[in-house]
Image (tube, rainbow, N blue to C red):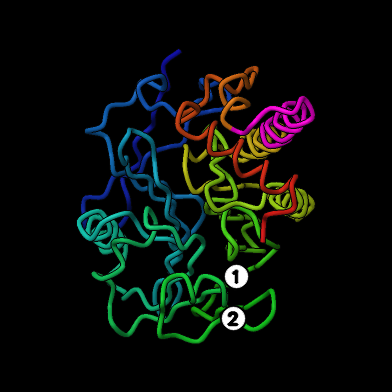
Amino acid sequence: MRPVFRSVISVLSVALVFVAVPSAAQLRTAYPEKRGLKRSEFPRTIKLAENVYGYEDIRNPGFTTVSLFVVGNDGVLLADGQGSPEATKKLLDAIARVTPKPVKWYVVGSDHGDHTAGNPVLSKDIKFIVTPFSKTQMKLDAPAMIGDRQVIDIGGIEVQALYLGRAHTGGDLLLYLPKQKILFMSEVYLNRVFPAMRSAYPSEWLSVINRALQMDVERYVPGHGFIEEPNASREELVEYQKAMRAVIAEVNRLHKLGLSADDAAKQAEWGPYKEWFLVEQQGPIAVRKIYEEIEGKLK
């Protein structure tokens, strides 16, 4: 099934084309080619609401890393960068095609390198919104958040950085726009990408997703995989939650059989999630991490 795109020409004076997000009937997958997309179509900017934009770029081995930016009266807030200075420079160029306003705030949704390695090209004056955990991981010389919620005044738009608990990392931040009912989840939500658990807290991660699903949100935006239309975005987050539960349950089953983590990784049956992106790479990692949690070794 091939997606149909409707190109919308911005009313800005620059020639800027936004991509319409595929409908819920679109084949749901993290594989670009299965959606009928070519690498030459990336990076791409997707308008999610007035002054709110998603940004998708393809990274090796061939799936998207997603950023989100919000244009306020006083400047631009960026949530998550990209995985290299070159890729983040492309992101900044895309923002500049939308607005001449400077990027003044940067929300660290994930402290992992595929979202932060391009940060050296950011302005030296940028203000980081970051959890204490991620500040330590990144060795940032910036104040950390106090508490689990920080409202950022970017002028005219209310933006909230939320810490709902440990999930993909120990310092996951989500970006919430209450008026627009948009929640950027960074690596807490990997749309149709097999759960990546190298530094994860599996059961706590499930709790974070539960809390997100209880919020007043119409569109959930992932940190990897494709941005969906509102209804599909909730359905896909629920599907991701099911994947997390299934992976945890399967590893618990194998652990009860007395298998080593290596043997369990070889015998694991992932059901429908065996078709998800990165399953070969991330499956064994998930087994080892869940074994750590079961055995009380996860700190």
Quarter of the image for residue 76 reads bottom left
SS at mark 1 in the image: strand
Q: Answer yes or no: do the residues labelled 1 and 2 have beta carbons within 8 Å? A: yes
Q: Hey, what amino acid is under mark 1?
A: Ala
- The residue sitting at 61% across, 39% down in the picture is 233
Question: What residue sits right under mark 1 in the picture?
Answer: 161
Question: What residue sits right under mark 2 in the picture?
Answer: 145
1 vs 2, front mark: 2
Earlier in the chain: of badge 1 and badge 2, it is: 2
- The residue sitting at 77% across, 24% down in the picture is 257
Q: Is residue 22 left or right of residue 45?
A: right
Q: Which residues are magenta?
A: 243-261
Q: Is residue 153 magenta?
A: no
The majority secondary structure of the magenta stretch comes to helix
Percent position (x, y) of residue 208?
Answer: 72, 54
Percent position (x, y) of residue 162?
Answer: 65, 68
Q: Is residue 6 left or right of residue 123?
A: right
Of 61 and 69, the residue lying toward us:
61
